[in-house]
Structures are given as structure tokens and as C-alpha cells.
Amino acid sequence: MATPRLSIAFPIPKSVIARLQAFQDSWAVPGVLWTDPAQLQLGLLSLGSLPLNDWIAICRCVQKVALDTPPLELQFSGMGGFPNLRRPKSLHVVTVDRTGGLAKLHRTLTDRLFDAGLHQPENRGYVPHLSLGRVPASSNTEAIAVEAMKQEQYDFGKMIAAEVSIFSTEVKRGTLQRETIGHYPLDGEFECP
């Protein structure tokens, strides 16, 4: 049996999820394989499959970093695409953090987990985003790109990121299952479900 994959992320508030759902429902161009908005999270780090005995050390590390991090005000505004919006293989919502605190939190978590031997940093820069959906090669990517560029200023809402969570995900009976391992208030007390 495969070990669940761990990730560190911010849960998304219901108000933003409702706007994401309304956006997907109103999208006019076919071909995008949408992500279920209820499954969305603002990822900080994807840790992959790790032995269960590493989970406690990861939780403690995240707790310590969270206690030294103030809450973050984040805006979800506009569309982006990977590798770019002109030829997207995936569509995402751009996350705006005017203070730079999100990038600092990502860097600090990466460094602390690397120092503890629990994470290998990626060779690419951190791009905070909410993954909206995939664009299969068989789709009309040109029409999708044109529609996405029209939405570059779409307002998906904002949030105060006051806690970071660790999630485990695994496929069970063909369905992606996500479970919360722990919640860690920024600048606050530790709470484990």
C-alpha cells in the first residue's frame, strides 16, 4: 500500500470557494478539466510520500515556523497559466501578497525542513496560486488562452491566512482523499485535530 502524500497549505475560505465555483460554472469555452473548488488549497510545499515516523518531526517544524509568522492578507485576483497563459497546460488563480510574507514563509519552511533532512527543495521558484484546472493537449488551447486572458483581472476574493495546515492525500477506490493532519495558527497556539 502506498504511503499518503503530505503537503503544507492554507485552507481556502468558503467565500473564495463560492467565487471559484461561480467562475467555473460561467466559463464559456469547453475543454478545461476543472478542479473541484472544495479540494483547493493554497500550497506552500509538497513533501511527497514520507515514512509515517517523519510526520511528527514535520508537524513540529511547521508549528515552530508558524509561531514566528504573522497572519497574511492575500488577494486572489486574475488568471494565470503554466507554463504561460498563451499556451496553458493548466489554469490557476494568481495569489497576490503585497507584504512578501508568503514567500518568506515558504523559504523558511523549505530551509527548516531541509536542515532536518525532511525535504529536498525544488529547482524552481515558488509561484503561489490556486490550481483551477488542467488543459488537455486535445483541447482548443488557443480559445482557452483567449478566454483566460479576458479574465486576468477577475476578483476571486481575499483571505486572512491565519493558520497553515498539513494535509495527507491518497487515492482510495479511484477517488482522491484528503485528510487534515494538523492546523498551526500563525503567531498563535498549536492545535491538532
Image (spheres, rainbow, N blue to C red):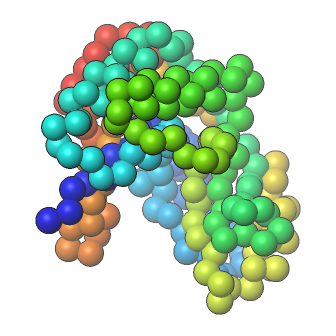
Q: Residue at x 55, y 30 (%)?
A: 106
- Up the image or down, 187 lies above or below 32; here it is above
Quadrant including the C terminus: top left
Q: Residue at x 77, y 62 (%)?
A: 84
Q: Residue at x 42, y 54 (%)?
A: 39
Q: Is residue 114 visible?
A: yes
In this image, 113 relative to 99: left or right? left
The image position of residue 158, as x and y in percent, is 63, 33
The image position of residue 24, as x and y in percent, is 61, 64
Q: Nearer the viewer, residue 160 or 90?
A: 90
- Up the image or down, 141 lies above or below 188; here it is below
Q: Residue at x 70, y 46 (%)?
A: 94
Q: Is residue 22 visible?
A: no
Q: Nearer the viewer, residue 177 or 112?
A: 112
- Up the image or down, 164 lies above or below 63; here it is below
Q: Nearer the viewer, residue 78 or 47?
A: 47
Q: Residue furthest toward the bottom? A: 138
The image position of residue 100, as x and y in percent, is 69, 23
Residue 87, by quadrant, is bottom right
In this image, 101 relative to 4: left or right? right
